[in-house]
Image: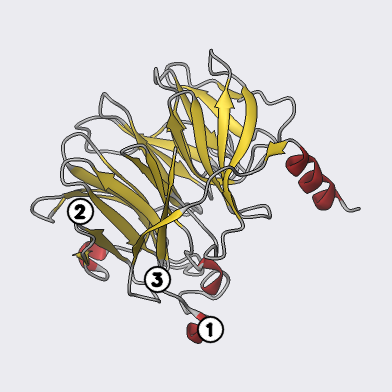
Amino acid sequence: MNKHALLFFIFLSHILLAQKKAETAFVIAEKDLIPEGIAYDPAEKAFYVSSIYKKKIVKISSQGKTSDFITTHADETEQVLGMKVDARGLLWACNNTPEHDTINRVSNVHVYDLHTKKMVKRFKLVDDNRHLFNDLYITKAGDVFVTDTQAGMLWVVRKDSKSLEEFTKPGSLAFANGITATPDEKFLLVSTGSGLGIARVDITSKAISSLRNDRYMVMGYDGLYVYNNTLIGVQNTFFPESIHKLTLTPVGNAVEKIEYLCDEDPVFDSPTTGAIADGYFYFIANSQLLQLIGNGDKLKQTEKLNDPVILKIKL
């Protein structure tokens, strides 16, 4: 048994089986969308879905009607990943130039007014290093923390700031991806692709530790979300692709158990991220990312694409 198979066996042996079945919430009639991020606006009860391939953002209204919120490459929008809606009705969207583009390396966070559809802020990073703004978390105070997967670090935009600041050092959080925070917001919780697993980052001191887990391998989550005293994680790094619920200790510094909420759904094709709304977890079930990864900005087999599906599961 090789190392990866052994890790996978250990991973599965301590996870409880799924107890619930996901339901279809929405189907987006756009096979080549290649979605990655999803955000929820509680004011309008609308969802926003990002597109890597088409470099745009799609809106799903409360009635389920789909329309372009931001059209392809508007405002110099690049491949769009994680998004969040803040308390002021602003949509924050991570976007980056294609990974194969080694000449024009740009990572952005665009901020849009949901009512006017106008971009009101842009935070742009251009340097000689590799970056990938992947996902973000917005605190109750209005600070925005951004994961940079390629640089392995966090950035922050302070409330009403006009600049992006380094929050942790490059390499401090290898393959940083999904991000959320403890309910008291004393710690950021960041999914990594390293032995740290889910990292706890002290929001005041910036000290980094691991979310303690004596029995579980908790790494490689794409989306990561806090719900009461649990974390909801989208696992697309290890087989089977699945949605996990991680129950934390009362003080929130360790994982007590992990349960499958949903696994091996026939719709699954690289599930990515999600959003919590009205007691349900909505998530992108079939991003079809593998059609794009390693192929520049060209799709591999368009004839095999399916309409993107948003599933939901009761929490």
Q: Nearer the viewer, mark 3 or mark 2?
A: 2
Q: Using the numbered discs, state the Cα–Cα distance from disc 3 to disc 1 in whole angstroms.
A: 13 Å
Q: Earlier in the sequence, mark 3 or mark 1?
A: 3
Q: Using the numbered discs, state the Cα–Cα distance from disc 3 to disc 2 in whole angstroms.
A: 25 Å
Q: Amino acid at mark 2?
A: Ser
Q: Is residue 225 left or right of residue 91?
A: right
Question: Residue 201, percent across and down?
Answer: 51, 25
Q: Earlier in the sequence, mark 3 or mark 2?
A: 3
Color scheme of the displayed model: secondary structure
Tell me the residue at 40%/76% (across/down): 32
Question: Contact, CB < 8 Å: mark 3 with mark 1?
Answer: no
Question: Contact, CB < 8 Å: mark 3 with mark 2?
Answer: no
Q: Amino acid at mark 1?
A: Gln
Quick one: quadrant of the C terminus?
top left
Residue positioned most to the right: 1
Tell me the residue at 19%/32% (across/down): 160
Residue positioned most to the left: 116
Give the labeled residue for mark 2.
Answer: 62
Q: Nearer the viewer, residue 136 or 68?
A: 68
Badge 2: residue crowd in 10 Å (few <14, some 14–19, many ≥20): few
Q: Is residue 159 visible?
A: yes
Badge 3: residue crowd in 10 Å (few <14, some 14–19, many ≥20): many
Question: Residue 152, percent across and down?
Answer: 55, 42
Q: Is residue 218 left or right of residue 39?
A: right
Q: For numbered disc 2, what is the local secondary structure? A: loop
Tell me the residue at 58%/71% (across/down): 294
Q: Which mark is residue 53?
A: 3
Give the labeled residue for mark 1.
Answer: 301
